[in-house]
Amino acid sequence: MKNKFFIILISLLICGELFAESISIKAKNISLDKNRDLSVFKNDVQIITEDNNKIFSDYAEYNRTSGLIILKDNIIATDSQKNKIKT
């Protein structure tokens, strides 16, 4: 329950900016599911926005239809002002 709260908090803080910007997502393992329009990123996931906001995680799932990114396991978010959130 605690992790879900932090995921929702991160989504609310950062998601509004992500819709208007392009982002870069990198990971060691990437798999695509064309039937469900999902991209799954595993192991050392790095998400970086144009404003230099950075999110690091062990797992990310990007739904191309809705534009949402779901993050799991060891999430660290840092904004351009060096504020940091860890879950």
Image (cartoon, helix red, strand yellow):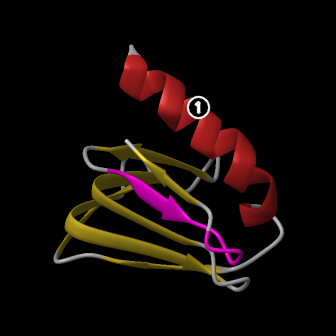
In this view, the residue in front, 35 or 68, is 68
Residue at the spot x=72%, y=48% of the render? 13
Q: Which residue is mark 1?
A: 8
Instruction: Give residue 44's position: percent from left, percent from top.
Output: 22, 70
Q: The C terminus lies in which quarter of the figure? A: top left
Q: Quadrant of residue 52?
A: bottom right
Q: Quadrant of residue 17?
A: bottom right
Residue at the spot x=26%, y=75% of the render? 27
Instruction: Give residue 2's position: percent from left, percent from top.
Output: 40, 20
Write the start and end of the magenta stretch as one range: 75-82
- Magenta stretch, main secondary structure class: loop
Residue at the spot x=80%, y=53% of the render? 16
- Name which residue type carries label 1: Ile
Q: Residue furthest top?
A: 1
Q: Position of 19 compared to 3: left or right?
A: right
Residue at the spot x=72%, y=40% of the render? 12
**Quick check: is 47 in the magenta stretch?**
no
